[in-house]
């Protein structure tokens, strides 16, 4: 087809106008995000998460909102979007790293394929308890190196939140031993650590998003799942399970993160506010988590959920069963030195 000169010029003008329009929209978007950065006006940041309103993650989010707005004398405005309004966990993580979302709270192991070492906090039977885990991620070289690794990928960690130890939730079957875990269909996050853990225990991992876990339990798609005790109440899992097997197999954490470019573009004093508010909010949430786990256990017992303690003998069997997967994970993720430090700190 032959394009005459006049028509060609019109087409070029249309393309020019189109790209000018797109460029203007991008500039306006950035301006809206950082409105008044140099004029002592509001800086609006979105914080999206996938947990329910009033749950642990939502309370952490709103505590940060309260502290950040107070410490900034109103210059920062934090808008919280709970219940996966801005995407499920993986989508929110991707959004922060790409810059389409400013803040989120996400399971640390979701960074496993993004930055070396992430996911070690979720390795099963790796930590002796909350104090051991907290020492590793906040006071040792392990935590410092992980934070540096993530900054290089576009995300800055404002804090490490521990929702509590994780145990097995079971719909119908009462489980007391490793042998009895074999063959059970267990809901797993869409994450390789959980999938490999259940395989190592002889179970059948079934990847299902957190928001669909209740229905999967209710309809018999899975025989059980694992979760922090308090979140059993947050998500109303107690309505569809009968037993909780207290394996305390994970002390996995969630990372409270902000997009690094967004952070760097904040005025220096607002950066300090974000860091201070994040640290204080996470410390608050961790203390609440310890308290809530005790309260949740009592509440669930009164509701009628049967708790099953794991014997020391069985706990050792569980630990031995996952050693090969941990060593392989460490090798595959350039994290052997991390595992060595963790094991030394546990002695």
Image (cartoon, helix red, strand yellow):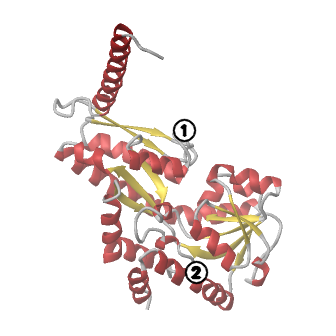
Q: Residue at x 31, y 26 (%)?
A: 23
Horizontal arrangement in the rendering, residue 337 relative to residue 191 (left or right): left
Local secondary structure at mark 2? helix
Name the quadrant containing residue 131: bottom left
Which residue is label 1 attached to? 85
Q: Quadrant of the C terminus?
A: bottom left
Residue 17 position (above or below residue 314) = above
Residue drawn at point x = 58 percent, y = 67 percent: 192
Q: Is residue 217 visible?
A: yes
Residue placed most toward the observer, 234 or 117: 117
Judge whether 193 appears above or below 289 on screen.
Answer: below
Q: x, y (%) of residue 339?
A: 44, 82
Q: CA distance from mark 2 to mark 1?
A: 35 Å
Rendered image quadrant of residue 309: bottom right
Q: Residue at x 19, y 42 (%)?
A: 267
Is label 1 in a helix, a strand or a loop? loop
Residue receiving disc 2 = 325
Kindly identify the residue that appears in the image at 35 percent across and 61 percent down.
150
């Amino acid at each position: 087809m032959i394009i005459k000169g006049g028509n060609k010029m019109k087409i070029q003008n249309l393309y020019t106008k189109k790209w000018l329009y797109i460029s203007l929209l991008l500039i306006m978007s950035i301006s809206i995000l950082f409105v008044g950065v140099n004029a002592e006006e509001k800086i609006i940041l979105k914080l999206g998460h996938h947990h329910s309103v009033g749950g642990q993650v939502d309370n952490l989010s709103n505590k940060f909102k309260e502290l950040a707005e107070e410490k900034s004398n109103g210059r920062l405005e934090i808008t919280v979007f709970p219940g996966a309004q801005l995407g499920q966990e993986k989508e929110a993580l991707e959004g922060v790293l790409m810059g389409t979302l400013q803040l989120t709270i996400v399971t640390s192991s979701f960074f496993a394929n993004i930055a070396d070492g992430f996911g070690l906090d979720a390795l099963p039977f790796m930590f002796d308890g909350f104090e051991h885990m907290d020492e590793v991620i906040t006071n040792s070289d392990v935590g410092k190196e992980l934070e540096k690794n993530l900054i290089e990928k576009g995300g800055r960690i404002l804090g490490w939140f521990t929702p509590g130890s994780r145990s097995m939730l079971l719909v119908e079957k009462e489980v007391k031993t490793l042998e009895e875990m074999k063959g059970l269909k267990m809901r797993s996050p869409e994450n390789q650590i959980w999938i490999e853990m259940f395989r190592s225990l002889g179970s059948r991992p079934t990847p299902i998003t957190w928001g669909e876990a209740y229905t999967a339990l209710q309809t018999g798609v899975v025989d059980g799942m694992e979760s922090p005790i308090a979140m059993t109440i947050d998500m109303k899992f107690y309505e569809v399970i009968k037993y909780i097997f207290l394996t305390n197999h994970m002390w996995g954490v969630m990372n409270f993160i902000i997009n690094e470019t967004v952070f760097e573009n904040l005025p220096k004093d607002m950066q300090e506010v974000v860091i201070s508010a994040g640290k204080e909010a996470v410390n608050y949430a961790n203390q609440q988590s310890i308290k809530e786990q005790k309260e949740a256990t009592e509440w669930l017992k009164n509701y009628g959920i049967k708790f099953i303690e794991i014997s020391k003998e069985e706990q050792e069997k569980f630990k031995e069963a996952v050693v090969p997967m941990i060593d392989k994970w460490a090798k595959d993720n350039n994290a052997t030195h991390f595992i060595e430090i963790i094991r030394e700190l546990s002695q």
